[in-house]
């Protein structure tokens, strides 16, 4: 996996060329395209999707400023119903949230050559990228991104991957990452307690303090045919927890509700969107499920988001917590390390939840053929 199977085209360059029709390699099969009523939503404007889709509701809001029992109950209910929730009163300064978003917006606004020097490869994904997965001829997503490892120190992205411009990008991203770790550690305690376990249980199972942390800044340019494509295909997140800072102006994230409908997330001002990843599904023996989500794009506005991924230590085998395994609910997943799991998922690119489902009932480790 040393290089991409085809020349990489920056979606931003395509979008800025003013083309009227998107190239064929971005056209999704009809079953994966957004429905017309889903494309009418813009933050700051009316609630077009709610108006057209009477079943539209948004993900639950959890107030982290409340009392511990209420927080645990709200998180349990959100995880069972949605696998997604928004947090408010989370303690992260709004100025830092704004600065992080602005720094990455600044990066994507640089001229192409300034960005190209950070072009990534499928070996580590670190840097400026425009695709996930190395399948030749794959249908691609309408978005560019920047990916960085923040932690642990041993795998932290080397200096050459940190954009020198905007000049505060590294400093702000590191400070932001530190706040995200603090928030995720709190959420991990809440998740443990919400399943009747000791508050340290989840963190211990994921390797104690040796967590991994990554940041993905996604940039979704304007798209002349948003009805034919997606900014990011349906997927669940492969790690433990994801904390997303949404664009403050433009919506795009959609979550697949239990009835199969896609619901567009309306982020509250200064809220974070949290979702559980595949590793929590495995550890909780599917009491909490990682939920598919995707991104729609639009013709009028670009959109930016910052996803922070809190992951288990790479070399610790993860399997359902014995306390959550019973004769009626046997262990659903074989032990596997997060490093093995990540290689397996990245090789195939976003495939909804098919990859995690394929592991159910398997007795052994992941192989290249899974
Ligand atoms: O841009 C978004 O809203 C979602 C990003 C996401 O799902 C991801 O990076 O995994």
Image (cartoon, rainbow, N blue to C red):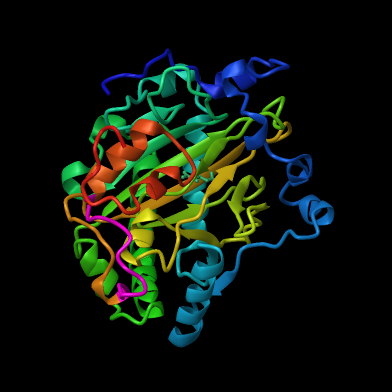
In screen coordinates, is 242 left or right of 102? left
Residue 123: image location, x then y, percent: 27, 28
Residue 325 is one of the magenta-drawn residues: yes
Q: Quadrant of residue 192?
A: bottom left
- In the figure, 213 relative to 156: above or below? below
Q: In this orientation, does residue 179 appear?
A: no
Q: How many marks?
A: 0
Q: Main secondary structure of the magenta part?
A: loop
Most extreme residue toward the front, as rendered?
327
The N terminus - image quarter: top left
Residue ID at (66%, 45%): 250
Q: Nearer the viewer, residue 110 or 19?
A: 19
Work out whether residue 309 or residue 88 is closer to the camera in this orientation and state it: 309
At 31% from the left and 80% from the top, the residue drawn is 197
Q: 207 or 353: which is nearer to us?
A: 353
- Identify the residue at horizontal 38%, vertical 48% (top origin): 356
Residue 237 spot, x, y in % from top left: 42, 49
Does the rendering let one see residue 214?
Answer: yes
Q: Is residue 23 magenta?
A: no
Q: In the figure, residue 59 lies in which quadrant?
A: bottom right
Above or below 299: residue 251: below
Split into 4 quadrants, where in the image is the C terminus? top left
Residue 348 coordinates in the image, percent (x, y): 38, 32
Among the 4 quarters of the image, the one containing residue 127: top left
Left/right placement of residue 143 relative to residue 338 reads right
Residue 31, compared with residue 223, is above or below; it is below
Q: Residue furthest right?
A: 51
Q: Which residues are magenta?
A: 324-337
Q: Residue 99 in the image: x percent, y percent?
A: 49, 49
């Amino acid at each position: 996996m040393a290089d991409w199977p085809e020349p990489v085209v920056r979606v931003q360059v395509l979008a800025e060329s003013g083309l009227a029709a998107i190239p064929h390699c971005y056209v999704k099969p009809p079953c994966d395209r957004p429905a017309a009523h889903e494309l009418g939503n813009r933050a700051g404007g009316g609630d077009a999707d709610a108006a057209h889709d009477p079943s539209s509701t948004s993900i639950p809001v959890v107030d982290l400023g409340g009392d511990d029992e209420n927080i645990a109950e709200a998180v349990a209910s959100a995880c069972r119903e949605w696998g997604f929730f928004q947090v408010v009163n989370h303690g992260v300064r709004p100025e830092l949230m704004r600065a992080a978003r602005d720094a990455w917006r600044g990066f994507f606004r640089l001229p192409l050559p300034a960005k190209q020097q950070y072009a990534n490869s499928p070996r580590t994904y670190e840097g400026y990228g425009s695709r996930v997965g190395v399948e030749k001829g794959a249908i691609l997503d309408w978005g560019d991104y920047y990916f960085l490892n923040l932690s642990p120190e041993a795998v932290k992205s080397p200096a050459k991957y940190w954009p020198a411009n905007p000049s505060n990008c590294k400093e702000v991203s590191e400070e932001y990452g530190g706040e995200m770790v603090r928030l995720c550690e709190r959420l991990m305690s809440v998740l443990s307690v919400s399943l009747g376990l000791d508050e340290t249980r989840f963190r211990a199972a994921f390797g104690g303090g040796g967590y991994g942390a990554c940041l993905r800044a996604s940039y979704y340019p304007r798209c002349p045919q948003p009805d034919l494509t997606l900014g990011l295909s349906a997927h669940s997140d492969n790690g433990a927890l994801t904390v997303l800072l949404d664009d403050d102006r433009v919506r795009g994230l959609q979550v697949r509700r239990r009835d199969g409908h896609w619901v567009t997330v309306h982020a509250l001002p200064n809220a974070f969107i949290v979702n559980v990843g595949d590793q929590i599904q495995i550890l909780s023996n599917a009491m909490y499920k990682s939920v598919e989500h995707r991104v729609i794009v639009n013709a009028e506005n670009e959109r930016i988001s910052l996803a922070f991924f809190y992951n288990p230590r790479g070399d610790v085998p993860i399997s359902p917590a014995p306390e959550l395994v019973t004769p009626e609910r046997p262990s659903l997943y074989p032990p596997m390390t997060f490093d093995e799991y990540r290689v397996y998922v990245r090789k195939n690119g976003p495939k909804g939840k098919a990859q995690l489902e394929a592991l159910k009932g398997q007795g052994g480790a992941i192989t290249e053929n899974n």
